[in-house]
Amino acid sequence: MRIIPASPCLHGGRGLREFLDTSQCNLKSQTSFVPFVSFVVRNHSFFAKGESLPVGSETYDRSLSYLYDLQKYGIKFGLSSTSNLLARLGNPHQNLRAIHIAGTNGKGSTAAMLSAILVRAGMQVGLYTSPHLVRFNERFRLNEQEVDDRLIMDVFRRVREVVDEREPPTFFEMTTAMALSLFAEKKVDWSILEVGMGGRLDATNVIQPKITIINNVAFDHQEFLGFTLGRIAREKAGIIKRGVPVITAAKQPVALAVIKERCFSLDAPCYRVGQQIKVRSQGKCHFSYRGLRWRLEHLHLPLAGRHQLLNAATALGGLEVLEQMGHLHPTAAQVEEGLRKTRWPGRLEWFSREPPVLLDGAHNNAGIIALRKALQEEYTYKRLIIVLGIMADKDLRGMLHKLAPLADHIILTRPKYERAAEPESLREMAGKFADRIELIRPVPQALRRAMTLATPEDLVVVTGSLYFVGEVKEIKEEQA
């Protein structure tokens, strides 16, 4: 008998994802987490070493169950567990050409742009991101396509075979080893890895990248990363390696000082958006780029929001530096096509056009500010209806203060996570900034209510958490 997390759709792997993505970080925190509230006892065991692993939905679910069970090991300090696991795999990461991306927001969008451009340039590209929105497979992409169940099973078996039970990995350490092993097996030309949280002691920091990107520095996960921008910046700057160029769009003087000091101490060239790298809006979804040598006009980026221009700047800056180092030579046409074909779900993503419904995974103050700016500048509507589900450990008052005054109607709900904030507590805070507030706890009913209220001239925005957005997307997939 084994206790495993219950999930509305175990095959999608969503049940414990938000706990696991938080508990991967190896930072020095004594914070304890309460596991997902719902558990179920099932009458089968997890895979033992050497067990045959036929491919099928049951076997795939058992693999996810094993991975999710790793949450019991909680938070560990240092990178030794990941390094030792990879050593037993033959250190597959050591021959990878990698791009490493950290930052409070925008990591996934930047990674998606890089992947799209490199694929159009004829490269084989592996992409590792977190969290997933609906399916576990979303974390692993080859040439922009989610890895299928069979490949997941193959790489899971390979990594599971070398796990030392005296040094069991966390969920994120295990999935990171899976990604690196998969990319080595497929002999990709480039591996793009998104930091899970922080950077210095994140499991992905075992790699030796060709270039490092730090998108930005803002407040989030303070209980792990520190309660000042300087401390948070130090954790993110921890991915900077000796002699490896750095691209950053960080703006705050204290954060920049930390990043520049780290670069100086490690002899790592530092390129800043706004200095050597510049972008300028040329109307909705179009912009120009001015870099070290590149001069590109009327680039089309389908990802909405002016904040995506900064993400594009770090991506293009990274590619340009790689070109100067002789690692690649993309044409302007390939860059343009890659940006035009970039897709990244859950970020100002259309969920429905009739009525108009947008999904956005803004989950911290910086993300909410970017969302607010987009709603004010890029969308027209008669009434704004916001459906809000937030994790309780966020700056609830700050997020509500920035977003609620825009809304004509707010519906507060509760995503299916232990960390989710109670709608009653949100109502008390939101009442100071908005008048029309409803409380509907079940997410499907909250979404249905918002879509019923909306006319074709209105706009519904579902936001507050990537996990909440993933739950809403799963509702749509189940209905389809």
Image (spheres, grey):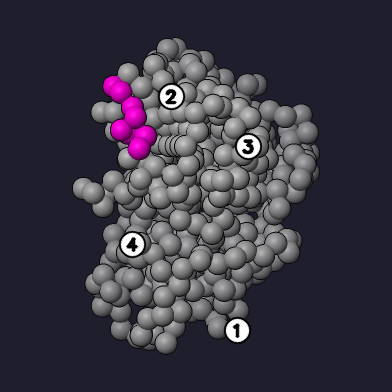
CA distance for labels 1 and 4:
32 Å
| Residue in front for this viewpoint, 400 or 369 | 400
How crowded pointer 1 is (Cα within 10 Å; few <14, some 14-19, many 20+) is rated as: few
Secondary structure state at the residue bearing disc 4: loop
CA distance for labels 2 and 4:
31 Å
Magenta run includes residue 401: no
Kind of residue sitting beneath label 4: Cys
Residue occupied by mark 2: 384
Residue occupied by mark 3: 429
Q: Position of residue 11 (x, y in %)?
A: 32, 64
Relative to 327, residue 200 above or below: below
Kind of residue sitting beneath label 1: Arg
CA distance for labels 1 and 3:
47 Å
Kind of residue sitting beneath label 2: Leu
Q: Earlier in the sequence, mark 1 or mark 4?
A: 4
Residue, x 57% and y 49% (percent of image)? Answer: 421
| Residue in front for this viewpoint, 454 or 171 | 454
Report the span colored magenta.
449-456
| Residue in front for this viewpoint, 326 or 200 | 200
Residue, x 23% and y 49% (percent of image)? Answer: 479
| Residue in front for this viewpoint, 223 or 190 | 223
Q: Position of residue 460 (x, y in %)?
A: 39, 30
Count of numbered marks: 4
Q: Are marks 2 and 4 in contact (CB under 8 Å)?
A: no
Residue occupied by mark 4: 9
